[in-house]
Amino acid sequence: MAASAVPLFSTAPTNRLRHCPQLPVSRLPAIPRVTSPCETVAPATRISLSAAIAPTHLRSHRRPTSPPSAMASEATAASGKQGLLVFDREEELSVSLAKYTAELSEKFVRERGAFTVVLSGGSLIMSLRKLTESPYLESVDWAKWHVFWVDERVVPKDHEDSNYKLAFDGFLSKVSIPPGQVYAINDALSAEGAAEDYETALKHLVNVGVVAVSSVTGYPRFDLMLLGMGPDGHIASLFPGHPLLHVTDKWVTFIKDSPKPPPERITFTLPVINSSAYIAMVVTGAGKAGAVCKALGSEKSASDLLPVEMASLEDGEFTWFTDKAAVSMLQGKASV
């Protein structure tokens, strides 16, 4: 994999960023307009949950054609809308996540002519695999996508620890997003330099209208963040108890003492994450059940919040995509 697959940021002024030649992209028809980006492919019952209240079933507007494969819940908090989807199998989660993402792509391309997507690492990329298949491979307007990373390890792009490499191998190399619209870090810089360079590039993209700005917070407002969570409740490269959780004067910051190797990384700050229009939090497996229970349980303590608990959209929609193992400790405790 050649590093030239993405534009490399430099310390030169942002308007001189070097973009690689774009791959040919055919103009494809947009996917049909839908009523809500939060519906799942398979029929699902919507469940309204509140603290310490058992689920009540709501009528689905779809006629069931097969047994429901997912349980959906949603609630409106003071700061935004939050929903929970629970799937029997990872395959069903992947199908639903692809439809959700494609529908949001259609929505934002129609409304603002671009779709800004933020990726994370880990198992998320595997969960995006259905986007590289029909009908989405042909119907999504990939030429309008702009792709960013919520965090990145400061390693060469062909290194096994690189989030860029993970995304390129599993997703980006299989779809026709113009390389000049895939924004990787400059891996030739130090962690501090790479963070500053990435923030400079984001500010340029805000100035030219590619990235929106939140009218509520003043921070950049990405259309969709596709995030994962670690067993310890960390998101991006924001770890429990770390001082970076409280950084508010930067869009992008750096860490040199990551509790999880490799130690040097860059990461979006919490205010940027919390200014998103939509977040899909993809969490599967019993190993993350404890953190899910703490994040979504009804018992809250402001003194020991996990990073994932601190992710709360100011004016947006936050949807959890989970499996039964991940929510196995939640029974009767959900607060969303």
Image (cartoon, rainbow, N blue to C red):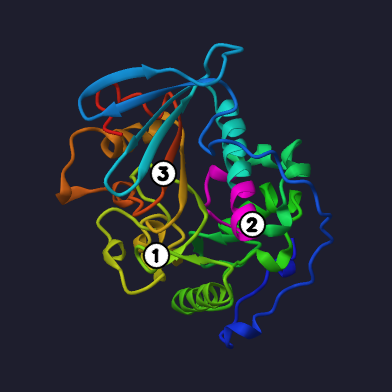
Label 1, secondary structure: give it.
loop
Q: Which residue is mark 2?
A: 165
32 magenta-colored: no
**Image quarter (top left, top right, bottom left or bottom right) of the N terminus:** bottom right
Identity, as a three-letter code, of the amino acid under mark 3: Phe
Q: Can you say whether 271 is above or below 336 in the image?
A: below
Q: Residues within 10 Å of mark 3 (few under 14, many from 20)?
A: many
Residue 318's disc number: 3
Q: Is residue 277 left or right of residue 15?
A: left
Q: Nearer the viewer, mark 2 or mark 1?
A: 1
Residue 331 placement (x, y as % from top left): 29, 21
Residue 207 placement (x, y as % from top left): 53, 77
The structure residue drawn at horizontal position 29% and vertical position 51%, both measured from the top left corner, is 310
Identity, as a three-letter code, of the amino acid under mark 2: Lys
Please tell me which of labels 2 and 1 falls first in the chain: 2
The structure residue drawn at horizontal position 22% and vertical position 23%, both measured from the top left corner, is 53
Residue in front for this viewpoint, 302 or 259:
302
Q: CA distance from mark 3 to mark 2?
A: 27 Å
What residue span does the magenta drawing correspond to?
Answer: 105-125
Please tell me which of labels 1 and 3 falls first in the chain: 1
The structure residue drawn at horizontal position 68% and vertical position 41%, both measured from the top left corner, is 131
Residue 13 placement (x, y as % from top left): 58, 87
Residue in front for this viewpoint, 243 or 73:
73
Q: Which residue is mark 1?
A: 215
